Image: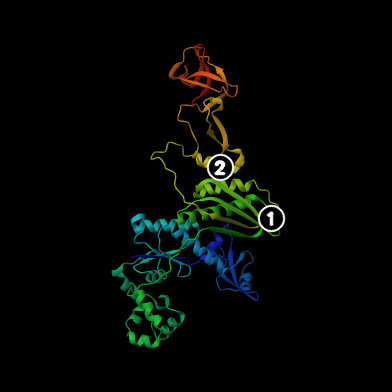
Amino acid sequence: MRWACILFPQLALDAVLRSREDLTRPLVMLSGTPQRRVLQAVNPAAREMGLRAGQTLSAARALSDDFDSVEYAPEQITHWHRFLAAWAYQYSSHVSLDYPRALLLEIETSLELFGPWPDFEARLRCELLALGFRHRIAVAPNALAARVLVNVGDGLVINEAQLSGCLKDLPVSRSGFTPEVASALAGMGLRRLQQVLALPRDSLAKRFPRTMLDHLDKLQGLHPVALDCYLPPDHFAGRVEFNFDVEAIASLLFPLRRLTADLAVFLAGRDCGVQRFVLWLEHRDGEATQVPVGLLSAEREAGMLFELARGRLEAVQLRAPVLAFALRAQELPRFVPAAGELFVERPQQSLAWEQLRERLRARLGDDAVHSIALRADHRPEHAWSSVPATGKQLLSKLPRPGWLLSEPQPLDDLFPRILCGPERIESGWWDGDDVRRDYYLIETRDGRRAWAFHPTGNSGSLWIHGWFA
């Protein structure tokens, strides 16, 4: 087996930065007691000002007051850790969250699907950068070795033959020992893992807990590493909290794009779609404003989800400033991709019918978009009805024009070319609107195709009832 470890060294800070539009603004994360506030993490712009993690807030303000601050929330690390596991689940069925701020993926079987490791690695890195998370990746024959090696290098790929030599060069402080064991080994003058491995096991067993020897055995692949496998949840919940009052819908579009993109990532990892989700606008007082977004079929494309949610959101009148913005999806049905063509003749700028239909429903409302359904009546003017838009359209197998005229018009072409016909329609005796007509598919002198008729028994001039596209 081969394991890849993805380490997120600044997971909490990246989670905050990805929800901000201006990344050039200095930002710090604060922790500690009210009496002694400490900088937990700083972004690159704050670092250029001389701010460093571990500084007190008073020391930082002595250097500059021109920076933003957010509270360090450990529970957010757990949330984003699980979100990234949901993203990784699309690439491996064995994903582990056992190590803080790191993901372990079994990739041996995934390489057959996603190609050789260099291509697979490039794909993982590209998607993580698009999501806004900095990372380091290492590959090793066992999970614990991959987790330890990612501490000392990014992009390392170690096989079975190279593992022993690579582990010997590891610093003891970066080998995954507990702080007590690492401190004791340092006190004995041991700086490299090679020195520890050279010691007699009996001596180590007398001086250190049994877990220390187990760690060494698992690191070398002598004993298997037991890991808990991640299972994705059956629902999605994303939330963005603002440190100011949002009073305009336009200010919610950036977090909306991020939330719908996160939803699409979650759906891809779970291999499902979404047919209904709800936007929650949280206010200081009163209940949250709920904006339901419904689709006619399950979808999971990020751009489409954003456009549909945007259309619904822009129709909302804010009754109060928004303090937090959330997206929740409870029902995640099975997703079946639409069959595509090998050569797409549709222009790149145009929309597929499904996307256009959903965008119109989001912009104009559900009642403004309808489908056309067949009725059990042969008369053209009674053979169709308008019904609420659905995922499927019922079309006739008979040649019928796309544009049916409200009133038939006389044909001004004296010598049309008859392509098909006649088709006799006699119906309507039960409601007093009886018709007896012979219909033809004709082509006029200028190349247009029409559906024309003349009354049964009357071979006179034709009447146009519809035009074909």
Q: In terms of image quadrants, where is residue 244?
A: bottom right
Assess disc 1: are there few (<14), some (14-19) or many (≥20) residues with their C-alpha within 10 Å of its C-alpha.
some
SS state under label 2: helix
- Tell me if residue 169 can be seen: no
- The residue that disc 2 covers is 359
Assess disc 2: are there few (<14), some (14-19) or many (≥20) residues with their C-alpha within 10 Å of its C-alpha.
many
On the image, the x and y values in percent for residue 348 come to: 46, 39
Q: Residue 58 vs residue 11: left or right?
A: right
Q: Residue 436 vs residue 224: left or right?
A: right
Residue, far left: 161
Q: What's the amino acid at mark 1?
A: Pro
On the image, the x and y values in percent for residue 55 come to: 58, 73
Q: What's the amino acid at mark 2?
A: Arg
SS state under label 1: loop
155 or 199: which is nearer to us?
Answer: 199
On the image, the x and y values in percent for residue 84 come to: 48, 61
Q: Is residue 282 above or below residue 369?
A: below
- Tell me if residue 58 can be seen: yes
Q: Residue at x 54, y 30 (%)?
A: 384
Q: Is residue 368 above or below residue 65?
A: above
Q: In terms of image quadrants, where is residue 63?
A: bottom right
Q: Residue 137 vs residue 370: left or right?
A: left
Distance from the alpha carbon under mark 2 to that under mark 1 = 27 Å
Quarter holding the N terminus?
Answer: bottom left
On the image, the x and y values in percent for residue 400 come to: 48, 26
Q: Residue at x 36, y 74 (%)?
A: 219
Q: In terms of image quadrants, where is residue 88?
A: bottom left
- The residue that disc 1 covers is 321
